[in-house]
Amino acid sequence: MNGMIIKNSFILFLYIISFNLQGQNLSEKDIYIVITENLNVRNQPKLESDIVHQVHLNDTIDVKNIVNNWYQIAYIENFENILTGYVHKDYVKKITKSNGEKVKVKEEQDLGFKSGFIYYGIRSFGLLLFASFVYYNYKTRTKDARFSGGYRGKDIDFLSFIKYAFYSLIISIPIALIAGIICFFA
């Protein structure tokens, strides 16, 4: 049983650590993303130039040079040829600084009350449910020398599962509401 508690605690630790690892930047160069549905890549840095390629929303692009209000980018055509073209800077957003520090990008789909509520609500519910099962295992253990840890655990019954799931839901709703409000104003 002690081994099970240690294992569950280790899984909980990994779960919490995963929150801190999200969004770490692994690259030291500038990264740009497309912030419009479809963005035309042009042959020259002017609006009248021929369209040679198209990039799409949230595509990352490699900016080689800046010419007035145009970014010269490199793209791959037919998985073989590396070509260059130009996109207007109004449709591209820089998401990292040159020193690798992450820059906050305000995208409509990634901000707001709903996304914060769902994201943190699901995670807090899962975390609380896991913690309640660890508590249940600890609370219902029985001293038994036949087992390696010296204790034997009781399997959780359906009604106890529903009870702990309900408690986890009740506690995670205010957490999700607060997180949604914070994401709305962030």
Image (cartoon, rainbow, N blue to C red):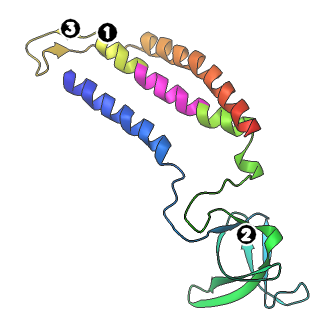
**Residue bearing mark 1:** 139
Residue pictured at 62% horizontal, 65% vertical = 97
Amino acid type, label 3: Thr
Q: In terms of image quadrants, where is residue 140? A: top left
Q: Is residue 117 left or right of residue 172?
A: right
Mark pair 3, 2: CA separation: 59 Å
**Residue drawn at x 76%, y 63% as measured from the top left:** 35
4 in the magenta segment = no
Q: Which tag, 1 or 2, sits closer to the chain's start?
A: 2
Q: Is residue 89 left or right of residue 18?
A: right
- Is residue 130 one of those drawn in magenta? yes
Residue 26: percent from left, percent from top: 48, 62
Q: Which residues are magenta?
A: 121-131
Q: Which mark is residue 74?
A: none
Residue 160: horizontal and vertical position, in percent? 43, 11
Task: From this view, report whether residue 14 is shown above or below residue 99.
Answer: above
Which residue is at the front of the view, 109 or 92?
A: 92
- How crowded pointer 3 is (Cα within 10 Å; few <14, some 14-19, many 20+) is rated as some
Residue underneath mark 2: 56
The picture places residue 109, in percent across and down from the top left corner, at 74, 49
Which x, y percent locates residue 5?
27, 24
